[in-house]
Amino acid sequence: MPTSTIVAARRSSRALPAMALAVILATLSIVAGSPLPAQAAPNSQIVVDRLSLEKVDANGISQPGVLNITEIAKLSFTWDASSADLSSGDSFTVGLPSEFNILVTTQTFPVQVEYPQGSGTMVEVGSCTTTSTAFTCTFSSKVDELKAEGFDGFKGSGFILLRAMSGTVTNTSSFNANGTARSVTLPAGSPIGVPGFREVGMTKNATLITATSTSMIWEVSFGSSYISRQLDVDGEPLALDGTTRQTITLTDTLGEGQAFSTDLSRWTFMMRNSAAEPNSRGVTLTNANGRDLTLAYGDFDLGVELNGREATITITGPFAASTNYRVIYPVTFTTEAGTPIPGASYSNTAGVDGTTTSASGVRNYVDAAGVTVEKAPGFGGFEVTKLVAGNAVASLRPGTTFDVTVNYVLPKAASEYPDWSAPGTLGADGVTGSTTFPVTVGKRNPYMGTFPQGTKVTLTEDVASADPAASGYSWGAPAFVVGGSGARTESASFVIADQASTAVSLTNTATIVMQGTFSVSKTVTGVEAGDKDFVFSYTCGSQTGSITAKGDGTAVEVGETFPVGTSCTITEDADAAAIEGYTLTPPQPQTITIDTADQAVAASFTNAYAPVPTPEPSPSPTPSPTPEPTEEPSPTPEPTEEPSPSPSPTEEPSPSPSPTEEPSPSPSPTEEPSPSPSPTEEPSPSPEPTEEPSPSPEPTEEPSPSPEPTEEPSLSPVPTGEPSASVEPTEAPSPSPEPSEPTPTPEATSTSGGAARTPASAVPAGPGAPTASSSPMPGASLARTGAQAAGIGAAALIAALAGALLLARARRSQA
C-alpha cells in the first residue's frame, strides 16, 4: 500500500470517534427540535363515565327493540380530565365485555374540547385508536399549548359502534372504563337475544363499509314457505319437499355507484337456518362457477347473467320447507378511488320473477365513531347524520355541506338560564330564537351547543345552500327522520331531552340533470375572412363564457354542458369582428334553448362586409374664363395737386406712325380687350390724352375676363359691364411720386338715358398721372355707347401703335 494511503487510513481511524460523536449530537439536536408523537401513558385520574348503549343500524340510526346477536349497538360515553393534571401523551382506555366487538377496528377518531368554552368551537386535542375489544384515546401536545393559555376544561364525550357477538342472560354488560368497571344497561332493558328459528319473508342487507372499503357484500334472504306462497298466486307453489328440483328466478338491480363482481366464484348460495337447525350460522351449498361445496342439503345450482347493473339470478334445487336461504355476492365502487363516498347511499333491490315480491336495502358510509357534546344536567342536544341518495351520487364531491336552520322555543325566558347563552338570534319575547349550523355529507354532525330540557326544536334545510353547488345534477327536497323510525318529512320537530342527544337523519336525493350543449358557426360575405377569429359571449342561466369560431363556417362546440331546457343568449363581439377598409352591420344576438342532450344545438351567424366607399369629387361647373386674381390690387394713387414734370426726351420724338390698317370706324368691344402699351422712360407725345377713359362697351351677362398680366404694365383696359380688378404688373413700373395727401376719387355720375362717364375735369393735370376708371351704368343707350366706343377705340389703337414704335426706337438707341 502506498504511504499516503496508509496515513490517510490512520487519520480516518483516529477521526471515527469524533465523527460518530458529531453524528450523535446532530441527531439529538434534530430530535430535540422536532415534535415527537405522544406515547400512550395511562392516566388513571381521567374519568370515563355515563356509558350507555342504543340499538342502531349500520348507519348509526337508532332502531327500536331488543338487541340480538350480529346486530349493532352504539356505545356513548363521557370523559373528564379537568382534575387529572393532563399532559401530552396521557391516555385513557375503554375495554369491552366478551359479548361485544368494535364494529370497525381500522379506524381512528378525534378527541375534542370546546375552546373557548361556551363558543361552540371544537378543538382537537388527541385521537383514539381501536382494536376489536378496546379503544384507547391519547392526548397530543395541543394539551400543553392550551394549558399554557390558562385553559383547563379538558372534558368531552364520544361514541363508538359495536356488534353483539353473543347472547346474555342479564340485561346489563360490564365495561372497563379506564380501570373502573361500569355496568351498562342493554338496549330495551333486555339481554342480548339469540333468536331461534324465525322464517323470514324476503330481505336485503349488506356488510358495513368504511372509508377504505373497496367492495361490499350484498345478500338477499328469503324463506322457502314465504316464496312458495307468493308463487302460489299464479298456481305454481314450490313443492318444498327437499327432493323435487325447482327453480326460483330473481332479478337484482344495483343503485348508482356500484358494479357487480364478474368473478362468479364469489357468488354463493347458502342455507341460513331452518326449523330443524335454528342455531345454524349458515352453510354454503354452491357457487355460480358450478362448484358444489356440499350436497348434504340437496344438489343446488346457481346461475348468474349480468347486464350492467342488473343481474338475473336462477336457483335450482330441492327446496325444503321452513328453511331460510340466502344468495351472497360482492360489488365494487365505481368512484375514481374505488372507495365509497362518505354519506352516499348505495342501494340494491331484488324481486322474485312471477310475483310482486321484492326487497330493497341501502348502505351508507358514515363514521363508526366520533365525538359528541357534553351536556350538563337539565340540558340536552341533537345530532344530524347527513346522507345522500339518487343516481348522481357518483358526481357528489366529498365534504359537501348544507346549512340547517334551527328554530327553537324555550320552556321559559332565556334570562332564566344564567349559565346558558341563547344561540343565534333571540326574539324580543326572550323565548323564541333561530340559528343555523352546517352539516357535512357522510358525517354525524353534533350540534355544538345545548338547549334547556323541554325546548322544542324544528329543523329545516335549504338545498340551495349546498357547497359546492350542484353541477350536472339537482337536489331534491330534504327528508328528515327523527329517531330512526319516524316518517320522512321535509322538516323535523322534537323536544330536547335531559343530557341526551336526539338522533336525526337527513337525506338529500341528487338526480342527474340531462345536459346538452350548443355550437356556433360563422360565415362571411364581401371579404375573404375564413381564417379570422370571431369571438362570441354567451349567457346560459347562471353560466357565462365565450367561444371563438373561424369565419369558414365550421361549427365549434362551446365545450360546456347545460341542463336541458336552459335558454342561452349568444352575442358576437362587434369590435373583434371589424375588418379595416370594410363596413359591417353586426348581427343581432341569438337566443337558443338547449332542448336535447343528444346533439349540440346550432347557432349560426353571418357577417356581411362592404368596402368603405371612396368619396368622388362633385363636378365643377364650367364658368366663363375669369382673370387670375392678383394677391391684392394696388390702389391707384390719386393725382397730386402739382404733378411731377415729365422727363425731357433724349431723342427727338418722331411723329406718330399711321396705323398699318385703317381702323374700322366703330369697333365692337371684344371679350378680351386689347392690351395697352407699356410706358417707357422716355415717353413720346401721345396723340390723345390717356387720362380720358374710353366709354364703356355694352355690358354683358358675364364679365369678360381680365387680361393676363404681361412683363410690361399695360394701360388701363377698356372697362366691361362689371368692373375688373386692376392687374398687378409683373415688372415694376417707373416709380410714381408719393401723394402728399390722398384725394378722394370722384364719383361717377349718370345722366338720364346715358352710360356713366368720367367728366373732363377729372383728367389729371400732367402726363404720367394715373387715370380713373368708371363703370358703365346699366340701361345706357346702345346707339350712344357704340358711337363713343368707335371714336375712342380708334384713338386708342393709334396711341398703342405709336407707343410701341417709340419704345422700339428707344431701345435701339440705348443699344
Image: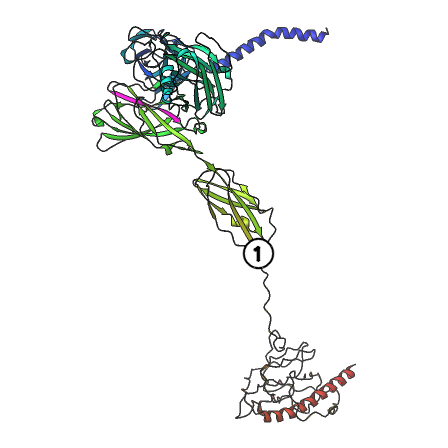
Percent x, y of residue 713: 67, 80
In screen coordinates, is 48 left or right of 780? Answer: left
> Does 460 appear above or below 648?
above
> Does 718 appear above or below 302?
below
Percent x, y of residue 261: 49, 19
In screen coordinates, is 411 left or right of 729? Answer: left
Residue span colored magenta: 377-388
**Which of 608 and 303 lies nearest the eye of the viewer?**
303
At 60% from the left edge and 7% from the top edge, which residue is drawn? 16
> Does 30 appear above or below 664?
above
At 74% from the left edge and 87% from the top edge, which residue is drawn? 805
- Label 1: element kind: strand
Amino acid tagged 1: Ala
Q: Residues within 10 Å of mark 1 (few under 14, many from 20)?
A: some
In screen coordinates, is 520 left or right of 205? Answer: right
Q: Which residue corresponds to mark 1?
A: 610
Please identify the quarter of the rendering in which residue 242 is found: top left
Scheme by which the image is coloured:
rainbow
